[in-house]
Image (tube, grey):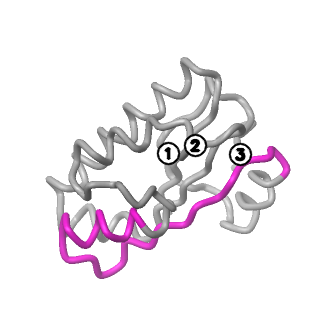
Amino acid sequence: MTLPDLRRAADAQLRALSVPLDALRTAAHAAGLRVLDVDLAALKGKAALLETLASALKLPSHFGRNWDALADVLQDDQWLGDAGIVAVLRNSAAFKQAHPADWEMLSEIFAEAIEFWKTRHKPLWVFLA
């Protein structure tokens, strides 16, 4: 499988990673996008997830570690930057299986953020690995 053009904000989405992670990193860097890696392995629920996201996604120190705060910060210009971001959620299937309600909320928040940035012509890609 091939990667989409990561520069095209209109095509950005939450999707399964179908190429090696190194290939994604190379393509993202070539597109001028930051790559942020989130490892969801062995997380024990919402609190651990939000703490991991805060660190891995380099969220601002004022991030309130709740769903509303996550939705707000993912739509913040200072977080996304000028070019865009590729976020890789590793071990997502295991987290989804262990914490389906938290996974559903996280997916919805990312989907809303992706759509928000599309209207501003900045790509936010989320790949599930």
Query: Please, what is the three-letter code of the amino acid marked with disc 1?
Result: Arg
Against 47, residue 109 (above or below) is above
Q: CA distance from mark 2 to mark 1?
A: 19 Å
Assign a secondary structure to mark 3: loop
Q: Give the labeled residue for mark 1.
A: 15
Give the residue at x 58% y 33%.
12
Q: State the image coordinates of residue 25 (x, y, percent, origin top left).
A: 73, 61
The stretch of residues the image draws in magenta is 30-54
Q: Residues within 10 Å of mark 1 (few under 14, many from 20)?
A: few
Q: Is residue 95 above or below residue 103?
A: below
Going from the N terminus, do you reach mark 2 or mark 1 first?
Answer: 1
Q: Amino acid at mark 2?
A: Leu
Query: Element type at marker 1?
Result: strand
| Amino acid at circle 3 | Leu
In the shown orientation, is residue 49 left or right of residue 60? left
- Say which of marks 3 and 2 sits in front: 2
Please state the horizontal and vertical placement of residue 108, each as a whole percent of the image: 29, 38
Q: At 47% from the left edge and 42% from the top edge, which residue is drawn?
A: 14
Residue at numbered disc 2:
80
Which residue does the image show at 47% across and 67% down from the upper left?
38
Q: Which residue is mark 3?
A: 3
Between 48 and 107, which is closer to the camera in this rendering? 48
Q: Position of residue 47 (x, y in %)?
A: 20, 68
Front-lying residue, 13 or 1: 13
**Is there a contact, CB below 8 Å, between mark 3 and mark 1?**
no
C-alpha distance separating marks 3 and 2: 21 Å
For label 2, count other residues whose C-alpha is less than 10 Å away and answer few (under 14), some (14-19) or many (20+): many
Q: Quadrant of residue 42?
A: bottom left
The one of 99 and 113 positioned closer to us in this rendering: 113
Q: Seen in the image, is 73 located left or right of residue 21?
A: left
